[in-house]
Amino acid sequence: QVQLVESGGGLVQPGGSLKLSCAASGSITRYSGMGWYRQAPGKQRELVASISHGGSTNYGDSVKGRFTISRDNAKNTVYLQMNSLKPEDTAVYYCKARVMFTTTDYWGQGTQVTVSS
């Protein structure tokens, strides 16, 4: 059973930084891509950032230049470095992994990020 466990969320002031981690139960090299999504109350879940098996990255327009996604295959972990946080970044952040050569996705349980003074 695949498990994705997010951590690193919390309360931070506007302009601050947080680093989220998504630890997988097995090798992340078996996934064609992994990504971070977020969902704010009353809004649809949206893509924040993704990283492919080959290391290509993609970002949502609202986070470009502020967030950075990275992966450490040896630790089976994907990270999301979030800088210059804004109140509108407040949401539950989810990690997703897509199994290579399939459309099967696995999701983590989410971690709350709250940006407030």
Image (cartoon, grey):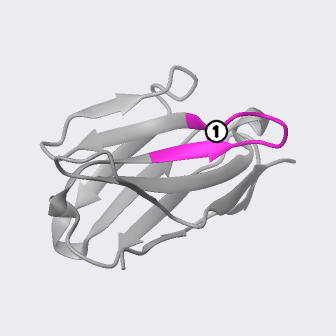
Residue 44: percent from the left, percent from the top? 70, 34
Q: Residue furthest left?
A: 54
The residue located at (84%, 37%) in the rendering is 42
Q: Is residue 40 magenta?
A: yes
Left or right: residue 13 compared with residue 1:
right
In the rendered image, the vertical position of residue 67 relative to residue 75, given as above or below: above
Q: Which quadrant of the figure contains the N terminus? A: bottom left
Left or right: residue 28 compared with residue 84:
left
Residue 105: percent from the left, percent from the top? 39, 53
In the rendered image, the vertical position of residue 10 relative to residue 90, given as above or below: below
Residue 32: percent from the left, percent from the top? 21, 47
Total number of numbered labels?
1
Q: Magenta stretch: give its range.
A: 36-46
Q: Nearer the viewer, residue 115 or 90?
A: 90
Residue 68: percent from the left, percent from the top? 40, 41
The residue located at (56%, 55%) in the rendering is 94
Q: Nearer the viewer, residue 20 or 58?
A: 58
Which image quadrant for residue 57? top left
The residue located at (49%, 26%) in the rendering is 60
Binning the other alpha carbons within 10 Å of mark 1 as few (below 14), some (14 to 19) or many (20 upward) gives some
Which image quadrant for residue 18? bottom right
Which image quadrant for residue 8? bottom right
The residue located at (78%, 38%) in the rendering is 87
Left or right: residue 55 compared with residue 24:
left
Instruction: Indicate the amino acid at tag 1.
Output: Arg
In the rendered image, the vertical position of residue 82 relative to residue 23, given as above or below: above
In the rendered image, the vertical position of residue 50 relative to residue 107, given as above or below: above
Q: Nearer the viewer, residue 48 or 18?
A: 48
Please, what secondary structure does the residue beneath circle 1 have?
loop
Circle 1 sits on which residue?
Answer: 45
